[in-house]
Image (spheres, rainbow, N blue to C red):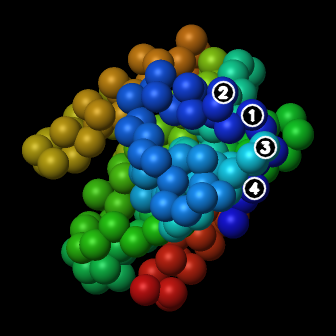
């Protein structure tokens, strides 16, 4: 459960500026609370506690960090194709791991899960305010479709590809590349752990 030492009033203003609805606290000690992207932030004097399944996006908004380059690793997993599916992502900058996460997404094909993992990774990188994103994944299909080298014939995958490209317009610069599975092992591990825990 991340605890962010900050001015709770400034943190509230950052959230409201991003369109996040902020409510009154539930107790005398809570200044306010907000839900966003599957997580809840609860503000106390001088700090905000973030809890929930996927806290990275809400943490990013609260910290208000901006700029720089991040490396985003993504992987999707499906047991059955289609079957129970999950996503995993890791964001790394010069100081180390910025955020990572894994969560189930219901029933999906492996390619649908790969796209969902990419979408999550790019959304979190955007929410952290990075200017540049270098994306790495072990799905050659997804990488080449996003780069426009391969056609996207499946209507659902085409829709996800459009979503990814829309998200990437929020960055000054982006690049996506295919990497061997062993380079993407942490994102793979997070996706599979989410499936194992479900």
Q: Residue 173 vs residue 159: left or right? A: right
- At 51% from the left edge and 67% from the top edge, which residue is drawn? 53
Residue sticking out furthest to the front: 28
Q: Secondary structure at mark 2?
A: helix
Q: CA distance from mark 4 to mark 3?
A: 10 Å
Residue at image mark 3 = 46
Vertical comparison of 171 with 91: above or below: above
Circle nearer the viewer, 4 or 1: 1
Mark closest to the chain's N terminus, 4 or 2: 4
User: Which of pointers 4 and 3 lies earlier in the amino acid sequence?
Assistant: 4
> Residue 38 placed where, x, y %?
43, 58
Q: CA distance from mark 4 to mark 2?
A: 15 Å
In the depicted view, which residue is nearer to us: 117 or 33?
A: 33
Q: Secondary structure at mark 1?
A: loop
Is 111 on the left-hand or right-hand side of 2? left
Rendered image: mark on residue 10: 2
Residues tagged 4 and 3 counted as in contact (Cβ below 8 A): no
> Could you tell me how far apart the alpha carbons at marks 4 and 1 are, in whole angstroms?
12 Å
Quarter of the rendering containing residue 84: bottom left
Residue with the mark numbered 1: 7
Residue picked out by circle 4: 3
Proximity of marks 4 and 1: CB atoms separated by less than 8 Å: no
Say above or below: 23 vs 112. above
């Amino acid at each position: 459960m991340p605890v962010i030492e900050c001015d709770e009033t400034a943190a509230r203003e950052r959230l409201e500026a991003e369109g996040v609805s902020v409510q009154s606290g539930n107790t005398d000690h809570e200044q306010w609370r907000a839900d966003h992207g599957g997580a809840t932030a609860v503000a106390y004097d001088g700090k905000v506690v973030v809890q929930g399944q996927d806290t990275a996006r809400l943490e990013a908004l609260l910290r208000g960090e901006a700029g720089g380059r991040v490396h985003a690793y993504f992987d999707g997993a499906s047991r059955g194709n289609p079957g129970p599916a999950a996503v995993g992502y890791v964001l790394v900058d010069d100081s180390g791991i910025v955020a990572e996460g894994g969560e189930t997404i219901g029933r999906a094909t492996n390619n649908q899960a790969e796209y969902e993992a990419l979408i999550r990774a790019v959304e979190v990188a955007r929410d952290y305010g990075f200017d540049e994103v270098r994306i790495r994944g072990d799905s050659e299909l997804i990488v080449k479709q996003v780069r426009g080298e391969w056609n996207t014939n499946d209507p659902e995958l085409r829709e996800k590809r459009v979503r990814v490209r829309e998200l990437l317009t929020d960055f000054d610069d982006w690049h996506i590349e295919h990497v061997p599975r062993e380079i993407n092992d942490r994102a793979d591990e997070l996706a599979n752990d989410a499936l194992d825990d479900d």
